[in-house]
Amino acid sequence: MLGRCGERESIRRVSHRLIRGTLDALPSKPAYDLILACSVLHHIPALPEFLAQLARLQSDRGAFLHLQDPNGDYLHDFELLKRMNRLEEGQAGRLWLGPSV
């Protein structure tokens, strides 16, 4: 996905650096303007901690973009079902841990 992105003519017009890896592998400085993930959130058992780590790595105006590959398997995912139950019970808590607007 990153390789294809880097080949696009439109991205060559802006200053950028594509980094492939995990959040743990990213240096905390500089702050990142865009963090992109694809089809991973349902695999993360400690989602609030993951989102807090994202917030620490982002610049003040940074964005986190998560893409999800749509397929029917997600309907039976244990983490998704657990989170849906928490939402229904009103126990979901605050999922976004970034700056308040």
Image: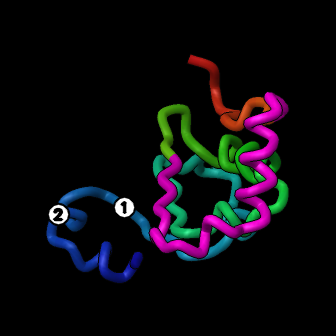
Q: Which part of the image, by quadrant, shows the C terminus?
A: top right
Residue 51, numbered label: none
What's the distance in space between the residues labelled 2 and 1, CA to CA? 11 Å
Which residue shows up at 80% across the image and 28% down it?
Answer: 90
Task: Evaluate if marks 2 and 1 touch, with contact meaning CB atoms under 8 Å apart.
Answer: no
Magenta part of the chain: 64-91
Disc 1 residue crowd, few under 14, some 14–19, many 20+, Cα 10 Å: few
Residue under numbered circle 1: 16
Compared across the picture, whether 77 is left or right of 33 comes to right
In-front residue for pair 63/44? 44
Q: Is residue 70 above or below residue 34?
A: below
Q: Secondary structure at mark 2?
A: helix
The kind of residue on which mark 2 rests is Ser
Q: Secondary structure at mark 1?
A: loop
Q: Which part of the image, by quadrant, shows the N terminus?
A: bottom left
Which residue shows up at 31% across the image and 73% down it?
Answer: 5
Residue 43: horizontal and vertical position, in percent? 72, 69
Residue 10, numbered label: 2
Compared across the picture, whether 54 is left or right of 66 comes to right
Residue 86: horizontal and vertical position, in percent? 81, 41
Which residue shows up at 82% across the image and 61% down it?
Answer: 45
The quarter holding residue 25 reads bottom right
Q: Is residue 9 magenta?
A: no
The kind of residue on which mark 1 rests is His
The quarter holding residue 79 reads bottom right
Residue 49: horizontal and vertical position, in percent? 82, 49
